[in-house]
Image (cartoon, grey):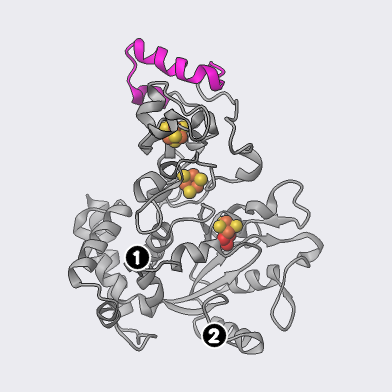
Amino acid sequence: MDSYNALYEQGVARLKQLQQLTPRMGESLQDKMEAKGISRRDFMKWSATVTSLLALPLSFQPLVAQAAEVSDRVPLIWLHMAECTGCSESLIRTDSPSLDTLIFDHVSVEYHETLMAASGMQAEENLEEAMETFKGNYLLCVEGAVPTANNGAFLRIGPKSETGLQVVTNAARNAAAIVSVGTCASFGGVQAAAPNPTGAKGVHEVVDRTVINLGGCPPSAKNIVGTLMYFIMFGKLPALDMFNRPKWAYGKRVHDNCERRGHFDAGEFVETFGDENAKDGFCLYKMGCKGPYTYNNCPTERFNAHTSWPVLAGHGCIGCSEPDFWDEMADFEKPLGRQIVKGLDASTDTVGAVILGASVLGIGAHAVTSIFAKSEEA
Ligand code: FSX
Ligand code: SF4
Ligand code: F3S
């Protein structure tokens, strides 16, 4: 509890500091919420949800609410490298702007190639000016992998034709914190899949700084906004796992919170897409689901205003938040056939029996979980 008290105090001090800065936006968050028909009550509910998402005690809720209100004091620079822009889309493409989208809109976005009106020389000047004006204080978000082969020549950006490698290393130098948004920026993503002709790498491999990795192709809006909120609130990085992903988001296996998990434990599997078992919502392991190897909060947080996530939609998880998933998790519609239960080769046909056997012996689902090869303690 002491550590929570210290964290709380840290948050209070940080927010006091931010409150003294001039807002970068004309309208307050309150004005924006009114314009979009979002009530104060919705906002309080949202701040309670974010508090629990960040694995903080409910007493932190007022801090989350205040942090959202002063998020227009925190300059954000968002760069695009080699990618599909799905990460930005995950955040902004919605027909009913959720509070997540609205908060992102409220953060002082100084540079974002997809969202800003400026282009060419003017855009380049905006970036240089933002890096100079907010030296040491801006939050840098990067979307996409960084091609490094031939000195980065596979990605050239802007009128000066700088390489992505130059742009990202320059911007990283004076950033207050760096967030890799998505699996491409985090681990190279599809660009880095074998044979990786462009030498694509994750941002953390090309900059000499700690980088927070938000795995996911794309990551959910919640994981992006939650990370921004944590930084705004405390001015520091959250606890990270072995791949530098925030533990509050990537601390649990997809398989452990999956609504089809009961069927896995009971050995009830979909055998072909669209069969009777699929209609009954059976487990997708035999259809290639990689939930047992993947760490992310998709089953609990979901996507698109909490409507769905891959497994609920009827396809297995493809492991999109894990390093090298394009190579390591393929074939996406076949089980890995890899040893997933200690000491037993759990092939497609034996996994149900293995788990059933364990149940018969009186081992509960959670004990079974704990013998999976990959440690939950990342
Ligand atoms: Fe990568 Fe983001 Fe996948 Fe796409 O840009 S994580 S390809 S969803 O959009 O970087
Ligand atoms: Fe859910 Fe996939 Fe695990 Fe089956 S294998 S319980 S569908 S995560
Ligand atoms: Fe990705 Fe699997 Fe979640 S495919 S979106 S980590 S369910």
The disc placed on residue 331 is: none
Residue range highlighted in magenta: 342-370
Q: Relative to 364, does residue 310 appear above or below in the rendering?
A: below
Residue 21 occupies quadrant = bottom left
The amino acid type, in three-letter code, at marker 2 is Ala
Residue 230 is at least partly visible in this image: yes
Residue at left 35%, top 28%? 262
Residue 28 occupies quadrant = bottom left
Check the image and name the residue furthest to the right. Answer: 150
Q: Main secondary structure of the magenta part?
A: helix
Q: Residue 148's x, y, as percent?
A: 74, 61
Left/right placement of residue 364 relative to residue 162 reads left
Helix, strand or loop at label 1? It is helix
Check disc 1 and report the residue beneath it.
234
Quarter of the displayed picture in which ligand 1 can be seen: bottom right
Q: Residue 66's x, y, as percent?
A: 26, 72
The amino acid type, in three-letter code, at marker 1 is Phe
All told, the count of numbered labels is 2
